[in-house]
Amino acid sequence: MNEVNKTLYIPLYGKSYVSEKGIILNDKKAEEIWRKEKFPLKGKSKSKWLAYYMAMRARVFDDYLKSELEGDAVVIHLGCGMDSRIERVKLFGVKWYDVDFPDVIKERKRYYCETDNYKMVASNINDSSLWSKIPSGENAVILLEGVSMYLKEGEIKNLFSNIEAKFKNIKILADFYTSFAAKASKYKNPINEVGVTEVYGTDDPGVFERERIKFFKEHSLTPEHLINELKGMEKVIFKALYAGKISQKLYKLYEYKSSN
């Protein structure tokens, strides 16, 4: 795998770690994959604080999906990595497409099986031909978790334009670095430890709006009810490291919706 693809092991480890502890996220698949793969993470990549943060982020995306999915909407998880959201949220009968680079999907197929409703799509999400592999429909919920920071502004705009052309009713949840976080990441970020040095950020969620896709609101990546699953000094330290004012200036979670 290339350096960007290797970053998938950081959240995988985090989800496995908290699942074994019985907090925040129940993810037996992450535990299984991590036991077998044991990718050699080091330094901050294996920090328990980052593990808690990765798990909370995943849980926020899970809860959003369960609350926002309506009717015959399809789910499209862009940059799925080895994530087991398809198993965690238990939305039986929903049309679901997990998308990632071909080498990631090849690895993923060692642990997941396609069904009539669940498909894994091997594609660079910047490739417009991706959308010919996914049937058109009225409604879609699209998740970009841990993806946008590897895409330039124009690439995200193009992605949103492709989504807009494909579906009528659209909901998108995506996490973003701020521009300050992107600059700081060149010097201090766990992803550096797997070889990634170039990432991107934005300070204006409106910059990605298209004709119909509009910024809707900002969500918390570390909601209080999830922080409360930590105990004692761990809770105090985590709040200071990942839920304080400094953290909120680095990392954002934005929701977009289509206007019809």
Image: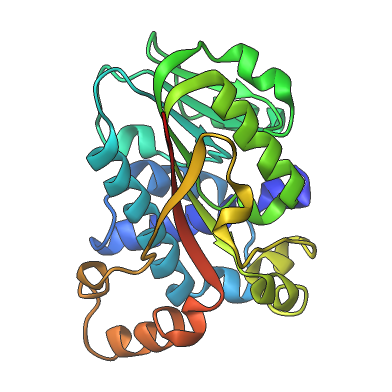
Q: As rendered, which of 151 and 185 lies closer to the eye?
A: 151
Residue 88: x and y, percent?
A: 29, 39
- Residue drawn 44% across the image and 76% down it: 49
Residue 203, quarter of picture = bottom right
Residue 24: x and y, percent?
A: 27, 61
Q: Is residue 179 above or below residue 158?
A: below
Residue 248: x and y, percent?
A: 47, 77
The answer to whether residue 56 shows anywhere in this view is yes
- Residue drawn 24% across the image and 31% down it: 90
Q: Quadrant of the C terminus?
A: top left
Q: As rendered, which of 218 and 89 lies closer to the eye?
A: 218
Colouring of the image:
rainbow
- Residue drawn 22% across the image and 88% down it: 232
Residue 20, quarter of picture = bottom left
Q: Is residue 238 above or below residue 119?
A: below
Question: For the image shown, how many numbered marks are present on the structure?
Answer: 0
Q: Is residue 253 above or below residue 116?
A: below
The answer to whether residue 104 shows anywhere in this view is no
Residue 81: x and y, percent?
A: 56, 41
Q: As rendered, which of 90 and 63 lies closer to the eye?
A: 63
Q: As rendered, which of 258 and 223 lies closer to the eye?
A: 258
Residue 43, quarter of picture = bottom right
Q: Quadrant of the N terminus?
A: top right
Q: Is residue 124 above or below residue 131?
A: below
Q: Is residue 94 left or right of residue 162?
A: left
- Residue drawn 66% across the image and 21% down it: 130
